[in-house]
Image (spheres, grey):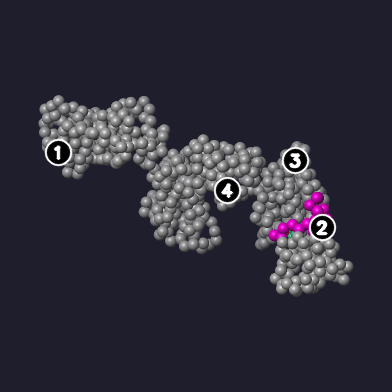
Amino acid sequence: MQNFEATKCPSDELSLTNKIFFNPNDVRSLKNQFIKIHSGSGSYAFLLDSNPSIPTGKAGFSLVQRRWANVSIGQPVGVEFNCSFDPRTTCIATHHHGPLQFGRDANRIHAMLSQMPLTVGQEIVFKFKDKKHLLLRVKEMETLQPRGDVVAAQFGVISGNTIATFEKLPDSPLVLTGKAKAKQPYQSIINPDWNFSMMGIGGLDREFSDIFRRTFASRIFPPDLVEQLGMCHVRGLLLYGPPGTGKTLMARQIGKMLRRSRAKNSVNGPSILDKTSGERKSKIRELFADAEEESHSGIGNRLRFAYQSASPDEHGRHQILGIHTSKIRDNGKLSPDVDVRELAAKTKNFSGAELAGLVRAATVTAMNRLVQASEKVQVDPDAIEKLCVTRHDFLHALEYDIRPSFGAQEEELDRYVTGGLVKWGNPVNHVIEHGLLATRAARAEAEAGADSGRPVALLLEGPRNSGKTALAVHIARQAGFSYVRLATSKNMVGFNEVAKCMAVKKFFDDAHKAKQAVVILDGLEGLIDYSPVGPRYSNYVLQALRDLITAPLPRNKCLLLLGTTSCRDALEELGLVQCFTAGKIHVSNLTQPEHLVTALNQLDAAKFTEKEVRQIYKSVSGCRLNIGIKELLDVARMTNRVEEGDRVRYFLDRLNEDGRLTE
Ligand SMILES: Nc1ncnc2c1ncn2[C@@H]1O[C@H](COP(=O)(O)OP(=O)(O)OP(=O)(O)O)[C@@H](O)[C@H]1O
C-alpha cells in the first residue's frame, strides 16, 4: 500500500468517468486497474487512470467521490494497487428483479458500469440525456456464491450476468419504466415512529382498522402494484357521527400516523368561520397549499364527488364490473372464483361509481391481508406475487363497505314487514293481485314509449292496523324495480310544511331519474297533517302531493305509486283519493274464524299448538271477529309470554277486551 495525498480531479469531464486519477509517473503502465483506497473512514474500490495534470504523490478525486468516500483535499489516503476481484465470489448478482430501461443511453451506461468496481454507498455520476447529470448510488450488493447462495457484499464488480435493480429517490424527477418500477421506493405515508399499541383510541379499534383498510392500505403498497390493480388512492375522508364519539381524536391520531409534513394541518371549523371573509379564504387556501404541493407525489388536493343518476341494469353492471376488474385480471391478480356475472346479479341498485367503489373495496380487502399492523405497519415483502382478489373479498366489500345510496333501502323497508307477510285469506291475495296488475300497467306505460307517460297510482285503504303498509312494501318488492322509497310522516317528525314538501319532492325527483321506480306514500293523512278535529290539514302539502302524483313522467320511465290511508273518506273530500287512478283497494281486517286459524297456523311470532288453535277456533265460531293483522300479531306476541295452560284463555280474553270478538 502506498500513501498519496487527495486532490481534485483535473476536469469536470474526467470526473464523469468516475475514476481516480494519478500522475503517469506514479502509476506507470497501470491503467483501468482496480485499486482500493483506504481513508480514515473506510475502504473503497475504484478504477484508476493517469493524467499528467495531477502532481506526483497525489490522487485526484471528483467532488462526488470526495463526498461519499469522506475524503477531503490534502488528506492522506492509502492506495492498494493491483487489486483483483475473484469473479467467483465478487461478481454482483441479483436474482429477482429486472433491469431499468435506459433507452438509447443503455449501451453507453452499461459499458461504463461493466468496467467498474463498486462499493456499497458509492455514488457514480454520468451524463444522461441533454447535459443533465445522473447520480447513481450503490445501495446494496449481493454476490452469487459458487454453491448458489446469495451473500451481501461490500465490494463487487459488475459482470455480464449481473442484474441491476434501479430505484429512484423519492424526490427525483426521473420516471422509471419497465419491471424496475416494482422496486421503486416510495416515501411511505406512514410515520416510521408510529406504533399501533400507543394509539390511545379506546373502543374504536374496529373503526380505526376499517379506516386504515379503506383509506391507507393502498398507500403502503409499492406504487407499481397499485398501478397494476388500476387503483387510485382515497383522497379525502369524512368522519361523521354524534358529538363526542371520537371523531376529532381519530382524525388527530390519523394525523400522527401520517408523516408529519402531511399531517400538520388541522383546523377547527368554528375557528375558521370566526375570521373575516378575506381572512377565512386565505386560511383555507393556506390549509390546502401544502397538500397542493404534495399532489405531485400522489397526495390529492381535491375531493371528488361522483354522481350518477340512474342505476344500470344487470347487463350494464356486468359490463361496468368487467371494465373495473379488467386491469386486475390482466395482471393475474383476480382469483378465478370471481364471477363478474354473479356480482352483477348481487349489485342491484348500484350506480357505476358504487360498482367502481366495490371493486376498489374488494381490492383493498385483499391488500389488507398482506399488511401486518400489530405494532408497526408492515407489508408482506412478497405482496406483489401474493396479491389475489377473491370472491370472498367482493362479498366482504358488499356486506361491509359499499351500499347503494340510490335504490331500495332494504333495511328500512324490512322494518315495515317485521312480522313477515301472513297470507290469512282471500282478501290478502286480492290486494297482492291488484298490486301485480298495477305493476304490469306501470311497465306497459314505459314500454309504450310515449313522450310522457303517467305514473300508475294505486291506493290501499282500510282500517288502522290492517297491514296496508306491509302490503304496499310487498307489492313494491315484488315489482323488482330498482328504486323503491317509502315516504312516511313517521320519518318527518318536526318538519314544517315546506320541509315536508321538499322531502316528498326529492323522492319523486329521484324516482323520475330511475328507469323503474316505486314510491310508497304511506299514511297520506299523516303526510298532509290531517286531523279530524277541525278538520285541519296542510293545504300546501296536499297541493304538492296532488301535483306530484299526477305529474307526467320523463320518456321511457316507469313509476308505480302506492298510497296508503285509513281515512279514505276524508281524503276523498280533499280530492286526493281521485288522484289514484289505477284503483282503490280495500285492505280488510280478519273477519272470519277461518282467517284467524289460517293466520295462527302461520305465525312465526307465536307458536300455537294444533290443539290450542282448535280450542281457539271452537271458541270464536259463531262470534263476530274484526281484528287487524298488526294487532293480532301483537296479541299473539304477548300470549307467548304466558304460561302454557293459560295461553288460550289469555288470547281470547285479549280479543274480547279490545272488542275484536263479539257475540
Ligand atoms: N297479510 C298481511 N298483510 C299485511 N301485514 C301483514 C300481513 N301478515 C303479517 N303482517 C304484518 O303485520 C304488520 C302490518 O302493519 P302495517 O304497519 O302494515 O299496518 P298498517 O295498516 O299500515 O298500519 P297503520 O294503520 O298504522 O298505518 C306488519 O308487521 C306485517 O309484517
Residue corresponding to mark 4: 395
**Number of on-image labels:** 4
Give the amino acid type for the residue marked by disc 1 in the picture: Gly
Q: Position of residue 44 (x, y in %)?
A: 21, 38
> Is 430 left, or right, of 54 in this rendering?
right
For the residue carrying disc 2, how many other residues have a C-alpha within 10 Å: few (<14), some (14-19), or many (20+)? some
Q: What stretch is highlighted in magenta?
A: 418-434
Residue 446 is labelled as 3
Task: Please state which amino acid type lies under the numbered disc 3.
Answer: Ala
For the residues carrying marks 3 and 1, which lies nearer the camera in this image? 1
**Mark closest to the chain's N terminus, 3 or 2:** 2
Disc 1 crowd rating (10 Å Cα; few below 14, some 14-19, many 20+) is some
Residue 425's disc is 2
Dot 1 lies on which element? Answer: strand
Q: Do the residues labelled 1 and 2 touch (CB within 8 Å)?
A: no
Structural crowding at the residue carrying mark 4, measured as other residues with C-alpha within 10 Å and reported as few (<14), some (14–19) or many (≥20)? some
Could you tell whether 39 is left or right of 611 in the image?
left
How far apart are the two marked residues, 4 and 1, measured between alpha carbons? 67 Å
Q: How far apart are marks 3 and 1 (CA)?
A: 92 Å
Q: Nearest the camera: 199 or 364?
A: 364
Q: Name the one closer to the observer, 465 or 228.
A: 228
User: Please, what secondary structure does the residue beneath circle 4 have?
Assistant: helix
The residue that appears at 75% across and 66% down in the rendered structure is 608
**Relative vertical location of residue 653 with respect to residue 488 in this rendering, above or below:** below
